[in-house]
Image (cartoon, grey):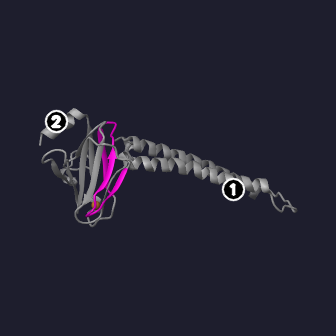
């Protein structure tokens, strides 16, 4: 990560996160237009002294200022709902990753294969090498193949946790006794960081998540190394 990379969130690497970023920009654009119009109107009202002593009603302007906000809300609500339903869609997965939250670390299981499970603890500061991130790197990373329909099952063993990775556009509660499900396709290789997002106890800040997305042949090679 560069300086710019370290002061903002990482880029979206799933089609869903890319769409979420487009939707955010779309909404912010509308917000800026409204703010500009309202600011202009307020300044104009404060600096002028227009008076209309005989004004009782104005059907046309009232119709416009009722319909315009309603239309604006529809143009935000429709793409928002569209995305909401797309995100909820589960396609037929090729790989399943099971994520289990513990106080205070994550453990992972690749249930499609035999005996592939491991714990993922944060690396303590004194064990970090120079190219690793403080409070963000882990000893065992989650390895996932790119361009593969992946299913993630999330649960917890003790208290509520939340498995959240901004670049995947995923933030899902890890609840004891419940199995939550989501799906994703990663479209580029790289290292992507996330953290637990549910206050889960004393070391809540110290259970980060690292995803390493790799080409499929490297993923198979990694599976064989177990
Ligand atoms: Cu947690």
Q: Is residue 106 part of the magenta span, yes or no?
A: no
Q: Position of residue 222 (x, y in %)?
A: 17, 39
Q: Quadrant of the N terminus?
A: top left
The secondary element bearing badge 1 is classed as helix
What segment is highlighted magenta in the picture?
170-196
Which mark is first along the chain, 1 or 2? 1
Q: CA distance from mark 2 to mark 1?
A: 61 Å
Name the residue carrying label 2.
221
Q: Residue at x 24, y 34 (%)?
A: 216
70 on left or right of 104: right
Q: Residue at x 39, y 50 (%)?
A: 88
Name the residue carrying label 1.
66
Counting every numbered tag in the picture gives 2
Does the beta carbon at disc 1 come under 8 Å from ligand 1?
no
Q: Is residue 195 part of the magenta span, yes or no?
A: yes
95 on left or right of 5: left
Between 94 and 1, which is closer to the camera in this rendering? 94
Q: Position of residue 89 (x, y in %)?
A: 38, 47
Report if residue 134 is visible in the image: no
Does the beta carbon at disc 2 come under 8 Å from ligand 1?
no
Q: Position of residue 141 (x, y in %)?
A: 22, 46
Between 125 and 29, which is closer to the camera in this rendering? 29
Disc 1: CA contacts within 10 A as few (<14), some (14-19) or many (>=20): few
Q: Quadrant of the C terminus?
A: top left
Between 170 and 91, which is closer to the camera in this rendering? 91
The residue mark sitting in front, 2 or 1, is 1
Between 105 and 187, which is closer to the camera in this rendering? 187
């Amino acid at each position: 990560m560069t300086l710019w990379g370290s002061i903002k969130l990482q880029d979206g690497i799933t089609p869903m996160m890319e769409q979420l970023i487009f939707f955010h920009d779309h909404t912010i654009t509308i917000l800026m237009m409204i703010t500009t119009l309202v600011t202009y109107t307020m300044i104009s009202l404060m600096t002028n002294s227009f008076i209309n002593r005989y004004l009782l009603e104005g059907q046309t302007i009232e119709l416009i200022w009722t319909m315009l906000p309603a239309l604006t809300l529809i143009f935000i609500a429709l793409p928002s709902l569209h995305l909401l339903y797309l995100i909820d869609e589960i396609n037929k997965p090729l790989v399943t990753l099971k994520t289990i939250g513990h106080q205070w670390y994550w453990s992972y299981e690749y249930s499609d294969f035999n005996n592939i499970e491991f714990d993922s603890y944060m690396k303590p500061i004194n064990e970090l090498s120079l190219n690793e991130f403080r409070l963000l790197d882990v000893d065992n990373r989650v390895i996932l193949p790119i361009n593969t329909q992946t299913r993630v099952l999330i649960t917890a063993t003790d208290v509520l946790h939340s498995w959240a990775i901004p670049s995947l556009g995923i933030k899902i509660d890890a609840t004891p006794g419940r199995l939550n499900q989501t799906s994703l396709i990663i479209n580029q290789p790289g290292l992507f960081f996330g953290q637990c997002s549910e206050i889960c106890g004393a070391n809540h800040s110290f259970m980060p998540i690292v995803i390493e997305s790799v080409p499929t042949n490297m993923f198979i090679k990694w599976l064989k190394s177990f």
